[in-house]
Amino acid sequence: MLDKISFMDARKLKKLQTELTKVLDEVAGTVRHPRQRRWCHTYVRGILLDGQRKSIEPMADRLQAIEQGDEDYEQALQQFINQSPWDEQAVLDGLQRWIGQRFTEEGFLILDDTGFPKQGTHSVGVARQYTGTLGKVASCQVAVTLQLGTPREVLGLDARLYLPESWTDEPARCEKSGIPEDVTYQPKWQLALKMLARARANGLRGTVLADSLFGSVTPFREQLDREGFRYCVGIGSALAVIDAETDLGPVAPYSGRGQPPKRPQKVRDGIKALNVKAWSIEHQADFRKVTWREGTKGKMASRFAAWRVRPAHKHGMGRVPLPACWLLAEWPNASEQPAKYFFSNLPADTSLKRLVATAKSRWPIEHSYRELKDELGLDHFEGRSWRGWHHHVVLVLLAYAFLQHLRRQRKKGALTG
C-alpha cells in the first residue's frame, strides 16, 4: 500500500506541468488573483522539487535557477505565503472535495497530533509542551491532523495549529503573530471535532480512529455518537466500565414527547465499576490470538479480547453509565499485563477480527508523516505568523494529494515515465 513516492527533478516536474495545473485549478480555484495564482503554482512546484529543505529561501533558489524568472523569487514567495490574504481554508475545502471525488473507497478518518521542534519563543504556537514526535516535553509547535486512510493510500485532509493557553492568555502576543481575534483556546479534542465536521460537510466518510489523547475524553466520544460517526479509539487504562447487561434500574415512563428514555435518571445502588485494566485482568481467560495483517517481517499478531460494556465515567459521583459499546484490549504474550485498550461503537455483532483490524488501522500515518515532513517539508516553515504557517501547511497537503493521485494513476497505467 505505501510504496515509496518518487519525488521530482526539474525534467519530471515539467513533464507533469499540465496535470499539476489541472489539479491546482480544480483544488485552488478560489485563488483567483493572477499574481496569487502564479505564486501558488510556483510554491507547490517548489514543494514537489527534490531538495532537502522546503523553506522559502532554498525553494526560491532552486526554482529561480531552473525557471530563470526575472523576478526575485524569494521576495515574491515570502509575500505570497506570509502577507497575501488568500483564503487557505477555501483551498482546504477544495482539496477535501477533490479527494472525496477521486478516492472513493470506504476508509478511515484518522486523527492524530504531531510536533514541529522549534527554537526560540516567537514562532506562532511554540511552547514547551509534550510531543510524541520526540517522546518528551520540548520547545515545539503542535498540530492536530486529520488523514484519510484508504485500502491503498493515506491522504492529509486537515491540520490545525494547537495554541497552548500560554499563548491565548496573552492577547498582545497573539496579535503580533497575526492570530485572528476570534481564535481562543481549544483543547485538541475540540479541534478534532471541528475537523471531522468539516470533512463530513465536504463529502468525506469513514470510521474515526484516534489514540488515547482523544479517545480518553468522554465528551469527545459522546459527540461522535451524537453526530453518527462510527469510531474505534484508544483509551487510558483508568477509564471505568460496567457490564453492558447490568440492570441499571427503572427507566422513567415515556411522556409522549421527544425520544423515549433509554436510561434511568438514577442508577440503583450496589453497581460496581472496574477500570478497564482491572476488567481485562479479571477476564484474562477471554484473550486469544488474532492476526490482523501481513507486515514487512511476516504476519502481525497478538492476543486480544472484546466485551460489550457501558463506559462508567464519574460513576462514583452518580453519573448514569453511557450506552453500550465495545471494549477491546490487547495483551501481548510477552507482557505481564494488558498493553492497549480501545472503545468502539461498531455494531454489536462485529467480529473480534474486524475490531482488531479496525483498531490497528492507524499505522499508515507514520509513513505519511515521514513523507510529509522529510520529503515535502511540512515542518520546514521558518516564518512566525499564523497566516504563513497555515498557508504553507495547506499547500503541502495539496502537493501530497497530487503525488498520491499520480501514484494511483501510475498503477492504473495512465501515466508513464
Image (cartoon, rainbow, N blue to C red):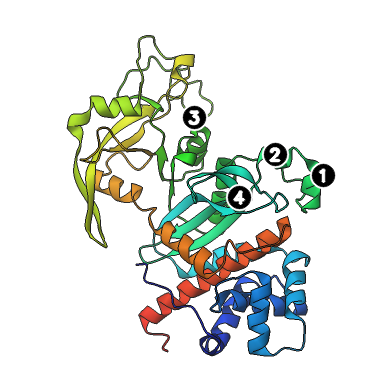
CB atoms of marks 2 and 3 within 8 Å:
no
Within 10 angstroms of label 2, few (less than 14), some, or many (20 or more) residues?
A: few
First in sequence: mark 3 or mark 1? 1
Which residue is nearer to you in this view: 330 or 106?
A: 330
Q: From the image, tell me which residue sits under label 4.
A: 140
Give the mark toward the camera: 4 or 3: 4
Q: Distance between the residues labelled 3 and 1?
A: 48 Å
Q: Quadrant of residue 336?
A: top left
First in sequence: mark 2 or mark 3? 2
First in sequence: mark 4 or mark 3? 4
Q: Distance between the residues labelled 1 and 2?
A: 12 Å
Q: The disc labelled 2 sits on which kind of residue?
A: Ser
Residue positioned most to the top? 269
Give the mark toward the camera: 4 or 1: 4
Q: From the image, tell me which residue sits under label 3.
A: 259
Q: The disc labelled 3 sits on which kind of residue?
A: Gln
Q: From the image, tell me which residue sits under label 2.
A: 166
